[in-house]
């Protein structure tokens, strides 16, 4: 008897790289079968809020609203240094000039928006839209600035845009911790045994991807916004790292710090459940 699970993740290269071996069964999975759904991160956030997926990539901002029903997996997420969202504008500006201005964001529940709100007051006039529209609309002058994520980090200068603030660097300077961007959540109702099994399988999927990078390349290119091998490699290199294999104590502390600060600002509800249900892997 197969055990079927619904799985959501984005079409971005870091996610398709991570999940390729899992969904295409390049690794042993016993009787587990994953039915994947590829959507932009804000759509995944909304689906998780409805409880529509057993297992899904979400923004850590969204996780702050989902902790009663979902636990965090130790593997598969995006967390690191030098990889945060950027505030960009069509001309050189500083953040003070953007207070009380309309700012384009890739979704209200994205970590990008959470970091913008944690940065300070006066940035509440946000306009959510698909992340791949932000650069063009800022370049056309529809908005004085936008917060960009994913591949846009590597291509915004081609649109004539200027960096106003690296929100990830601001976070690192303020906390000394890596920046939590997105994590993999699983329904707590599935129970700790199955959760641990899936967490271990996800880690094997990432290990396979690192060992056989050519295997996932057709799948990555079938879904990527930018098809350049150099951009794809840069994207994977930035967002898939040791924290993707296992968050470890440092990664979990970074997530806890982000959520605690968001709670203190009233941006997410409090929760006393543990972040993870899966035990730390044996060394």
Image (cartoon, rainbow, N blue to C red):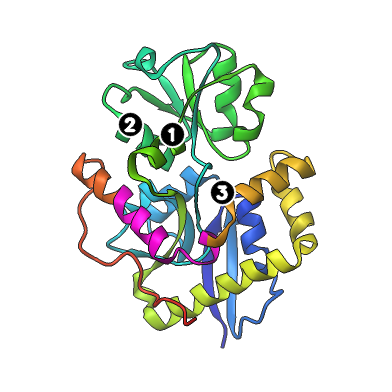
Q: CA distance from mark 1 to mark 2?
A: 8 Å
Q: Which residue is mark 3?
A: 39
Q: What is the x, y in percent for residue 95? A: 39, 19
- SS category of the residue bearing label 3: loop
Specify whether residue 110 is in view.
no
**What's the magenta region?**
243-258
Which residue: 61% across, 21% down? 136
**Tag count in the figure?**
3
Picture disc at residue 119: 2
- Mark 3 or 1: the one toward you: 1
Q: What is the x, y in percent for residue 145? A: 47, 19
Q: What is the x, y in percent for residue 282? A: 47, 82
Question: Would you say 244 lies left or right of 117 here?
Answer: right
- Mark 3 or 2: the one toward you: 2
**Disc nearer the start of the sequence (3/1):** 3
Q: Identify whether 111 is placed above or below 27.
A: above
**Disc nearer the start of the sequence (3/2):** 3
Quadrant into which the N terminus falls: bottom right
Which residue: 48% across, 15% down? 143
Q: CA distance from mark 3 to mark 1?
A: 24 Å
CB contact under 8 Å: marks 1 and 2: yes
Predominant secondary structure, magenta span: helix
Q: Which residue is mark 1?
A: 167
């Amino acid at each position: 008897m197969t055990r079927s699970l619904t799985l959501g993740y984005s079409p971005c290269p870091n996610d398709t790289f991570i999940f390729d071996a899992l969904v295409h069964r390049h690794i042993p999975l016993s009787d587990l079968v994953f039915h994947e759904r590829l959507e932009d991160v804000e759509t995944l956030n909304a689906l998780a809020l409805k409880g529509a997926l057993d297992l899904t990539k979400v923004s850590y901002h969204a996780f702050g609203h989902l902790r009663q029903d979902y636990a965090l997996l130790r593997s598969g997420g995006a967390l690191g240094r030098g990889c945060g969202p950027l505030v960009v504008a069509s001309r050189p500006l500083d953040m003070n000039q953007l207070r009380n201005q309309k700012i384009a964001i890739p979704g209200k529940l994205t970590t990008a928006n959470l970091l913008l709100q944690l940065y300070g007051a006066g940035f509440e006039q946000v306009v959510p839209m698909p992340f791949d529209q932000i650069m063009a609309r800022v370049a056309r002058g529809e908005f004085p600035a936008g917060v960009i994520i994913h591949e846009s980090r590597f291509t915004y200068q081609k649109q004539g845009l200027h960096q106003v603030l690296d929100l990830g660097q601001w976070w690192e300077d303020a906390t000394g911790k890596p920046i939590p961007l997105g994590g993999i959540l699983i329904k707590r109702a599935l129970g700790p045994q199955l959760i641990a099994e899936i967490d271990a399988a996800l880690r094997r999927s990432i290990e396979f991807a690192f060992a056989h990078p050519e295997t996932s390349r057709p799948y990555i290119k079938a879904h990527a916004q930018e098809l350049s091998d150099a951009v794809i490699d840069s994207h994977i290199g930035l967002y898939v790292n040791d924290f993707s294999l296992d968050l470890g104590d440092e990664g979990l502390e970074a997530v806890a710090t982000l959520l605690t600060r968001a709670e203190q600002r009233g941006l997410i509800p409090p929760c006393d459940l543990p972040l993870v249900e899966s035990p730390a892997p044996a060394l």
